């Protein structure tokens, strides 16, 4: 493998790809920016299920499905979103969402961009991204999500919540471990992902995924608007 090429793993929230109004221009702008940043980088994009996953999980739960079955609905929708992002990325991206880490890693030997969605029940695509970063041995993970960083509490519910520009792995674990369990939770970073980045010492940047300027800066390891989680 060419060691000149740096691996960057990005967890992309499904809600970032497709806004409420069904407009695909955001997807195109994101894909164009990503393609401009592959000269010295391999990008591994782990895509979330967003509101489509939440809608399916809601319907499934109403029909009486168990949590693991609901997780599978989330996994399938994240793969559907990954497929859509691949269409926007074109021929520089591996043709299909990788189903597991082995496939993603071998795809990265042939393509500068690889997309994948979920893998197994019990966690979110943040955890998939953290595990993929661990498998790749990369020391940087970006979480492009629907908030502009990690807050002391949920900023959508608590007006007094403060954004933390720098925090440790343990501080992140403390913040996210208060979140709910079950399919489709709303949390800035999956608690399992938080434990994986700690054990593998993966510096993680959390930023608003619609802020393409910040996302591009984080990919280039330059200053960005958001939170940095380090040891
Ligand atoms: P997401 O990764 O989309 O979660 O997975 P999210 O935090 O809602 O992400 P956004 O909104 O896209 O940023 C959605 C659901 O799919 C199941 C879980 O139930 C998760 O909550 N899932 C996903 C799995 O069970 N395993 C996976 O590997 C991925």
Image (tube, rainbow, N blue to C red):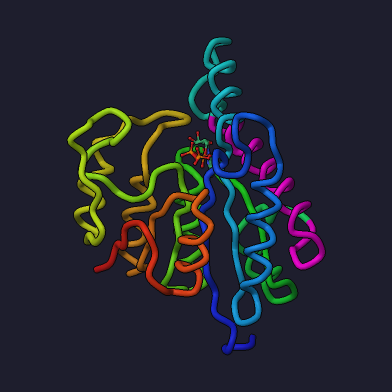
- Give the x, y percent position of residue 222: 42, 74
**Please, is residue 5 above or below residue 135 in the view?**
below
Q: Residue furthest top?
A: 63
Residue at figure coordinates x 50%, y 56% from the top left: 129
Question: Can you tell which quarter of the image residue 204 is in?
Answer: bottom left
Residue at figure coordinates x 32%, y 31% from the top left: 156
**Please, is residue 17 above or below residue 206 in the view?**
above
Question: What range of the chain is rendered magenta?
Answer: 71-95
Q: Is residue 87 magenta?
A: yes
Q: What secondary structure is the stretch in magenta mostly built from?
A: helix
Residue at figure coordinates x 64%, y 74% from the top left: 38
- Give the x, y percent position of residue 127: 45, 51
Q: From the viewer's perspective, tell me whether residue 169 is left or right of residue 42.
A: left
**Please, is residue 118 above or below residue 156 in the view?**
below
**Please, is residue 80 above or below residue 141 in the view?**
above
Q: From the viewer's perspective, tell me whether residue 226 is left or right of residue 12.
A: left
- Give the x, y percent position of residue 162: 20, 45
Q: From the viewer's perspective, tell me whether residue 197 is left or right of residue 36.
A: left
Q: How many marks?
A: 0
Q: Is residue 134 magenta?
A: no
The quadrant of the rendering that contains the C terminus is bottom left
230 or 181: which is nearer to us? 230
12 or 177: which is nearer to us? 12
The quadrant of the rendering that contains the N terminus is bottom right
- Give the x, y percent position of residue 90: 80, 60
Residue at figure coordinates x 69%, y 76% from the top left: 109
């Amino acid at each position: 493998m060419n060691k000149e090429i740096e691996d960057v793993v990005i967890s992309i929230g499904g809600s970032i790809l497709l806004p409420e109004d069904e407009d695909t221009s955001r997807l195109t702008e994101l894909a164009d920016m990503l393609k401009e940043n592959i000269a010295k980088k391999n990008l591994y994009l782990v895509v979330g299920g967003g509101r489509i996953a939440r809608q399916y999980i809601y319907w499934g739960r109403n029909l009486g499905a168990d949590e693991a079955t609901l997780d599978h609905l989330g996994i399938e929708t994240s793969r559907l979103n990954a497929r859509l992002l691949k269409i926007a990325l074109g021929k520089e991206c591996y043709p299909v969402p990788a189903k597991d880490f082995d496939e993603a890693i071998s795809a990265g030997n042939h393509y500068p961009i690889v997309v994948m969605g979920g893998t197994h029940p019990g966690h979110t695509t943040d955890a998939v991204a953290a595990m993929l970063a661990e498998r790749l041995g990369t020391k940087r993970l970006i979480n492009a999500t629907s908030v502009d960083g990690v807050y002391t509490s949920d900023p959508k519910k608590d007006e007094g919540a403060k954004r933390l520009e720098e925090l440790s792995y343990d501080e992140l674990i403390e913040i996210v471990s208060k979140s709910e369990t079950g399919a489709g939770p709303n949390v800035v970073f999956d608690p399992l992902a938080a434990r994986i980045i700690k054990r593998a010492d993966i510096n993680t940047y959390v930023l608003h995924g619609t802020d393409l300027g910040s996302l591009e800066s984080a990919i280039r390891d330059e200053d960005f608007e958001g939170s940095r989680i380090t040891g």
